Image: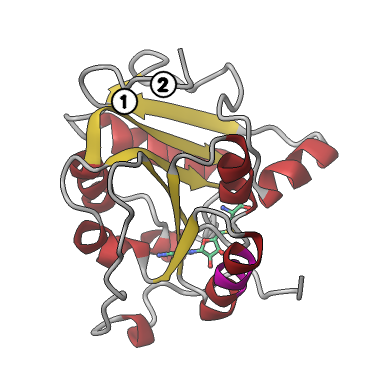
Amino acid sequence: MARHRQHVNPLKMAYFGRTAEPLALPPGRAIEVELGCADAQFLFQRAAADPDRSYVGLEIRADLAGEVADRARRLGAPVQVVFCHANLDYAQLFAPATVARAFVNFPDPWFKRRHRKRRVVDAALAADIAASLVPGGELFFQSDVWDAALDALAVLEAEPRLTNRAGPWSFWKRGNPYGATSRREDGCAEEGAPVWRLLYATGGRAPGSGAA
Ligand SMILES: C[S@@+](CC[C@H](N)C(=O)[O-])C[C@H]1O[C@@H](n2cnc3c(N)ncnc32)[C@H](O)[C@@H]1O
């Protein structure tokens, strides 16, 4: 796969005023979404493990989205990708109570204080994700950047429809329970870098929930 520049400024004007292509989802299948999927390694692994579900990657980089679409076609995998700005487009892409799992794997960290407003996990997105989840649906977040993980924890604790499966204000310490790893996650494992994880669920319990 070609090398790509790491970060795209999600506040760039080019992303405003355009809307994502409408998403046609196969009926009757549980939907799993990764926000900021990059090469969608995580979703392709999920699809290989459980091909009866539908997987949707959201990606702000058109080149990456194109590569994911090509790969999905080549493999015949139940993976779709939407070239979009997840923060702006999520609520339009997913109707209320339709998503089984939403994943935010290693979002761009935006270390500098003045860049923090570019971070993908904010209160508006948390509300959109919470609304999209089916009862018992899950939101899983992981990051190797402590500061970004702490910010995400604060944002997600404030969303009243989400319950922290590890207990209030706690990180999920039992590892990634989904049997799939993202590219960045593999890099962290190789380097021995710590990863902070969060697992939230909406009220009720989804059948086949991976994170008992
Ligand atoms: C650090 S990479 C992590 C990729 C992958 N999830 C992983 O764990 O290997 C973050 C990805 O999120 C994408 N991204 C950043 N902001 C986004 C946004 N607002 N909407 C959609 N994608 C976004 C970036 O282009 C990049 O591909």
Tag shown at residue 201: 1
Give the residues drawn in magenta, as a range.
67-71
Quadrant in which the C terminus is drawn: top left
Q: Report crowding for label 1: few under 14, some 14 to 19, many 20 or more residues within 10 A (C-alpha).
A: many
Residue that mark 2 sits on? 209
**Mark closer to the chain start, 2 or 1:** 1
- Indicate whether 182 appears above or below 2: above
- Residue placed furthest toward the right: 190
Residue 115 x/y as whole percent: 45, 65
Residue at (27%, 83%) from the top-left corner? 18
Residue 92's mark?
none
The answer to whether mark 2 and mark 1 are in CB contact below 8 A is yes
CB of mark 2 near ligand 1 (< 8 Å) = no
Q: Residues within 10 Å of mark 2 (few under 14, many from 20)?
A: some
Q: Which secondary structure, mark 2?
A: loop
Q: Residue shown at 30%/65% (left/top)? A: 23
